[in-house]
Image (tube, rainbow, N blue to C red):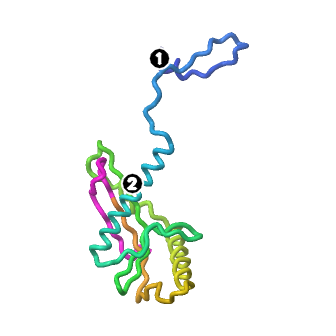
Amino acid sequence: MDRGDAFRRIAPLSLGVVQRRDTSPAPTRRPAAREKDDRRWLGRLGEDLAAAHLERLGFTVLGRNVRTRYGEIDLIAFDGRTLVFAEVKTRRVSRRDRVAQPHHDPLASLRPRQRVRLRRLAVAWLSREVSRTDPESRPRAETIRFDAVGVVLDANDRLLRLDHLEGAW
């Protein structure tokens, strides 16, 4: 049976056409739930690497995956003077590529809408922290900055490249 036979449209039985069933093996795709878990795991790994990078730079991570009514902030960090709200983008390079190519750049997927969203999230987080009973719960920062961190991993989830764009927006 050729490939055309396996995927032929099934005509109505009233026309006297014999119905054929696809007997080819099922494609080797992961179920959708597994793919979603893999994306979450990949994002979590990228956020772990970005948080470790910020800590090496002297920042204290105040929050990870902080939910507000407008969405989620990947990382919030503070170094005593600067409060950073960071968006983390993670990409995995396939086995056949072996080296990160320009189209693997995670920061290329940043859009102006994300800037607007991240600023709205930051305002929501700041206003929530101010409204708490403890007035010292929110750090007093001289500067607020919006950063983007791009993480590129190889097929074995080893770090190939980490790009930290300070003041991305």
Residue 109 x/y as whole percent? 44, 60
Which residue: 66% across, 18% down? 11
Residue 100 x/y as whole percent? 29, 53
Which residue: 58% across, 69% down? 70
Q: Nearer the viewer's eye, disc 1 or disc 2?
A: 2
Q: Is residue 157 magenta?
A: yes
Which residue: 53% across, 85% down? 130
30 or 108: nearer the viewer: 30
Is tag 1's residue or tag 2's residue first in the polypeptide sequence?
A: 1
Q: Disc 1 and disc 2: Cα gap in Å?
A: 39 Å
Q: Which mark is residue 2?
A: 1
167 or 158: nearer the viewer: 158
Residue 43 x/y as whole percent? 41, 58
Q: How many marks?
A: 2
Residue 42 vs 131, above or below: the answer is above
Q: In this image, 57 relative to 32: left or right?
A: left
Could you classify mark 2 by the number of other residues whose Cα lies within 10 Å: few (under 14), some (14-19), or many (20 or more)?
Answer: some
Q: Is residue 159 magenta?
A: yes
Residue 43 vs 33, above or below: the answer is below
Label 2 residue SS:
helix
Q: Quadrant of residue 53?
A: bottom left
Q: Which mark is residue 121?
A: none
In the rendered view of the protein, which quadrant contains the C terminus? bottom left
Which residue: 46% across, 46% down? 35
Q: Which mark is residue 42?
A: 2
Q: In this image, 15 relative to 21: left or right?
A: right
- Furthest residue to the top? 16
- Furthest residue to the front? 133
**Segment colored magenta:** 152-169
Q: Amino acid at mark 2?
A: Leu
Residue 13 vs 117, above or below: the answer is above
Q: Quadrant of residue 166?
A: bottom left
